[in-house]
Image (tube, rainbow, N blue to C red):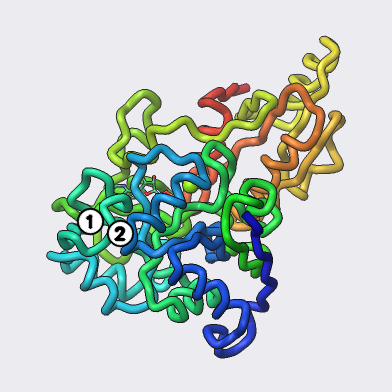
């Protein structure tokens, strides 16, 4: 399949009437799949109302067919067509965080979207993205869009159009290239179907921010404890891990440097994942700065690209510094810990 590549400037006004967006929307209306930038990561969109269109998402990504998709909308009207019995707490969260990186799990209206979007479930995941290109595409297509991250299953989520092209060229109808995404990690997934909302996946909106709006919020135990069965179907799948084994180190620079030397003495090439503050202070075979420690949002923003860059290098092992688990740090450490297969060394 020929994959179109359209470059769009997200700062333009009336994006929905731009030829690139109109062409991409036309393909979506024809039940093709198109990748587009959001404020979290690139999404792979298809008409959420069509079985045929949604099946193409699973096929292009190689995604297990029991892993449900998030429906992306541009108006509240679309929400009421898809979900029912929306609790008051959820309404308050919507008011505060939409459009934005918060996905809500709500009771689904029967037959409102393709069964392939919510395989075997009576709930549906919904989000209104804030990225102007994403919103314009939804408006121009006139459709709710089912959209997981636009990577091959098992690879890190794409934060640049290049990542999407590397994974999916030839497998999808087109890529809308709006430059680098914002948050750089996926949306927070919040289950709003019980008494107390539960975070199923930490992400762009933090626990602290949610609690400010709706009081106590729980975190699915599977996120905090290895071996617990997660409530979100997608969280049970093996997550991306770089080709070279990654170990997170809780300790000083000197300690990390000694681990590096130890491996080098055995003839191995060693990579270090650090931040801009310290990138010139290590001696290793490949040192990559992942944002700035002073600004954890920049770490989130760079993380997936940095993991892909290590895969393009020839290192045998990687040591990563660790990050505080507060605020966006919870999502960073969740993704990093998975990429490390839970291997953490403490000094
Ligand atoms: P992705 O679109 O690849 O970022 O993944 C979406 C995440 O939301 C996956 O972890 C899914 O398992 C999860 N998800 C989607 N729909 C539901 C749902 N109805 N209930 C629980 N989790 C869901
Ligand atoms: Mg994904």
Drawn side of residue 141 relative to residue 35, left or right: left
Which residue is drawn at the image coordinates 30% and 59% (left, top)?
A: 104
In the rendered image, is residue 32 in sight?
yes
Q: Position of residue 276 (x, y in %)?
A: 77, 49
Q: Secondary structure at mark 1?
A: loop
Which residue is drawn at the image coordinates 53% and 65% (left, top)?
A: 38
Drawn side of residue 45 relative to residue 321, left or right: left
Q: Position of residue 114 (x, y in %)?
A: 28, 57
Quick one: 68 or 132, which is closer to the camera? 68
Quarter of the image where the N terminus is located = bottom right
Identify the residue under disc 1. Answer: 192
Question: Within 10 Å of the Cα at label 1, are there few (<14), some (14-19), or many (20+) other Cα atoms?
Answer: many
Determine whether 101 is above or below 330 in the image: below
Report the Cα–Cα distance between label 2 and label 1. Answer: 6 Å
Quarter-of-image position of residue 295: bottom right
Q: Secondary structure at mark 2?
A: strand
């Amino acid at each position: 399949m020929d994959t179109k590549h359209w470059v769009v400037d997200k700062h333009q006004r009336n994006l929905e009437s731009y030829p690139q967006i109109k062409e991409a929307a036309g393909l979506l209306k024809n039940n093709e799949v198109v990748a587009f930038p959001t404020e979290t990561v690139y999404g792979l969109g298809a008409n959420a109302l069509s079985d045929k269109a949604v099946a193409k998402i699973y096929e292009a990504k190689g995604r297990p067919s029991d892993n449900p998709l998030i429906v992306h909308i541009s108006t509240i009207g679309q929400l009421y067509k898809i979900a029912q019995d929306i609790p008051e707490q959820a309404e308050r969260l919507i008011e505060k965080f939409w459009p934005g990186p918060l996905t809500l799990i709500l009771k689904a209206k029967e037959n409102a979207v393709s069964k392939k979007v919510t395989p075997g479930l009576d709930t549906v995941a919904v989000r209104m993205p804030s990225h102007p290109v994403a919103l314009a595409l939804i408006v121009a297509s006139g459709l709710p869009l089912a959209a997981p991250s636009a990577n091959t299953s098992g690879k890190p989520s794409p934060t640049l159009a290049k990542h999407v092209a590397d994974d999916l060229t030839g497998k999808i109808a087109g890529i809308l290239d709006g430059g680098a995404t914002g948050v750089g990690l996926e949306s927070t997934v919040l289950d709003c179907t019980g008494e107390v909302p539960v975070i199923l996946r930490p992400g762009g909106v933090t626990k602290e921010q949610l609690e400010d709006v709706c009081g106590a919020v729980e975190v699915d135990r599977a996120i905090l404890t290895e071996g617990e069965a997660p409530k979100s179907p997608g969280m049970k799948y093996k997550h991306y891990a770089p080709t070279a084994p990654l170990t997170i180190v809780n300790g000083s620079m000197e300690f990390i440097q000694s681990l590096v030397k130890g491996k080098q003495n055995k003839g191995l090439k060693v990579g270090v994942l650090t931040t801009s503050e310290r990138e010139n202070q290590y001696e290793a075979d490949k040192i990559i700065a992942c944002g700035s420690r002073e600004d954890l949002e920049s770490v989130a923003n760079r993380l997936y690209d940095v993991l892909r860059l290590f895969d393009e290098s020839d290192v045998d092992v990687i040591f990563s510094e660790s990050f505080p688990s507060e605020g966006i740090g919870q999502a960073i450490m969740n993704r990093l810990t998975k990429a490390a297969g839970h291997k953490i060394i403490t000094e």
